[in-house]
Amino acid sequence: MIDVYTADTPNGVKVPIALEELGVPYRILRVNLGAQEQKRPDFLRLNPNGRIPAIVDPDGPGGASLSVFESGAILWYLAEKFGGLIPVDPVERVRALEYTFFQVGGVGPMFGQAGWFTRSAPEPVAFAIERYRKESNRLTAVLEARLQQVPWLAGAEFSVADIMNFGWLDAPDYAGVNLADYPAVSGWRDRMHLRPGVQRGMAALR
């Protein structure tokens, strides 16, 4: 039974979806972000960066309990341990890695900043809003080009990369992205929503 410390956010939904897709039992331990529970010492022992998600696997390497933080690391750990979500084809495996890190280094930070400056900044900062919205749209255009060629980000096979990118692209308005301008991304998002594992993972946080 994997303990999942998370919340209903674009990053927080990744781990439940992955575990549902892998068919692995888990327990949701909700972290109240508004109450800053992610900054408390007990959580910081799991994730010194003070962010969700984090997991605890009671049966880690050597049978010892193991905590893992950062969503990309968590998903690759789970995929390797339980044997799924990583393409067998070596080229598609590399593509899955590419688009996992594309999300970690690009989509997540840029979408997050676009939304924060639009909704949470004490005062509007027009330059920042324009910059981060423009970058969010540029990154979505990269995904659009990829998904015009293949059904899933790794290629023919659904993978960790799709789960990593899904949360933010499922709430594109947050970053000022209109998916009507990106039909291939929109179709990919629709295919994601049709997957029972995705549906169950999202429902687990509702």
Image (tube, grey):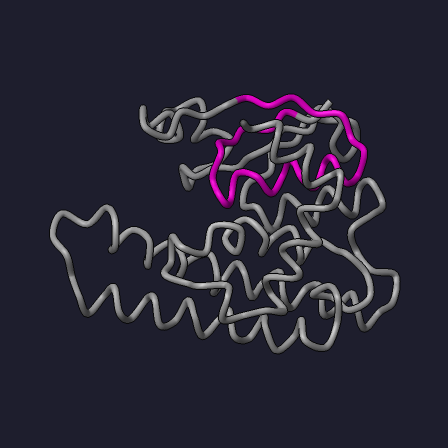
Q: Position of residue 64 (x, y in %)?
A: 72, 26
Which residue occupies the foreground of this view, 133 or 44?
133
Q: Is residue 177 above or below residue 39?
A: below
Of 157 and 109, which appears nearest the observer?
Answer: 157
Toward the left, the furthest residue is 123
Q: Pick whichever, 87 or 204, lies toward us.
A: 204
- Left or right of 193 on screen, residue 136: left
Position of 67 relative to 121 (above/below): above
- Span shown in magenta: 3-29
Residue for point 82% across, 66% down: 156
Which quadrant would the C terminus be assigned to in this image?
top right
**Front-most of 151 and 13?**
151
Q: Quadrant of residue 99?
A: bottom right
Left or right of 12 on screen, residue 115: left
Q: Where residue 33 sits in the image (x, y, percent)?
A: 37, 30
The quadrant in which residue 68 appears is top right
Quadrant location of the N terminus? top right
Q: Residue at x 79, y 39 (%)?
A: 22
Q: Where residue 60 sits: x, y (%)?
A: 74, 32
The answer to whether residue 24 is left or right of residue 111 is: right
Q: Residue furthest front?
A: 180
- Residue at image position (52%, 75%) is 141
Is-magenta flag for residue 9? yes
Expressed as whole percent of the image width and height from the top left, the position of residue 143 reads 58, 70
